Amino acid sequence: MCWYCGEPVTGDGPMGRSARCSCGKDLRCCRSCRFYLPGARGDCSEPGSDLVSDKERGNFCDWFSLNPRFRSPTPGEQGARNARAHAAADFNKLFT
């Protein structure tokens, strides 16, 4: 999913620096990376990374790896998410 709008990210290959979501935001940026960790040095948990000033713009970081939670879910994963969402909704109905 796009870190900004939530649109699914498709494709399994490497992501180029110019990859953009339909909302216009860069996809290969710190905010989409699995190493992005606000509060860490440079907001990155990878100790060998360079400091990037704009975390929302595309960059050439050699450590970039798309955060797995932003990848489009497979049909099986989507079914499990739907089941959890329905269970949570049913639980919340008990208290309303």
Image (cartoon, rainbow, N blue to C red):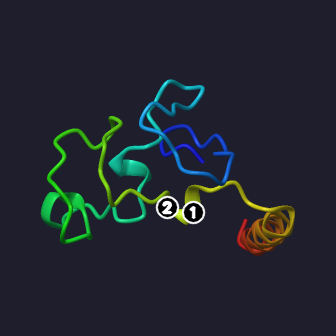
Against 88, is 31 above or below?
above
Disc 1: which residue: 69
Residue drawn at the location 22% of the way across and 38% of the way down: 54
Residue drawn at the location 49% of the way across and 61% of the way down: 67
Quarter of the rendering containing residue 7: top right
Against 96, is 20 above or below?
above
Residue 67 is labelled as 2
Residue 23 in percent (x, y) is at 55, 26
Residue 15 is labelled as none
Report helix, strand or loop for mark 2.
loop
Residue 39 in percent (x, y) is at 19, 64
Q: Nearer the viewer, residue 25 or 81?
A: 25
Report helix, strand or loop for mark 1.
helix
Residue drawn at the location 44% of the way across and 34% of the way down: 26
Residue 89 in percent (x, y) is at 77, 66
Against 61, is 4 above or below?
above
Question: Mark 1, residues whose alpha carbon is within 10 Å: few (<14), some, or many (≥20)?
Answer: few
Residue drawn at the location 81% of the way across and 64% of the way down: 82
Q: Quadrant of the C terminus?
A: bottom right
Circle 2: residue type: Asn
Quarter of the rendering containing residue 92: bottom right
Gap between marks 2 and 1 measured at Cα: 5 Å
Circle 1: residue type: Arg
Q: Nearer the viewer, residue 21 or 19?
A: 19
Q: Is residue 3 left or right of residue 12?
A: left
- Tell me whether the residue at label 2 lies in contact with that at label 1, contact meaning CB atoms closer than 8 angstroms: yes
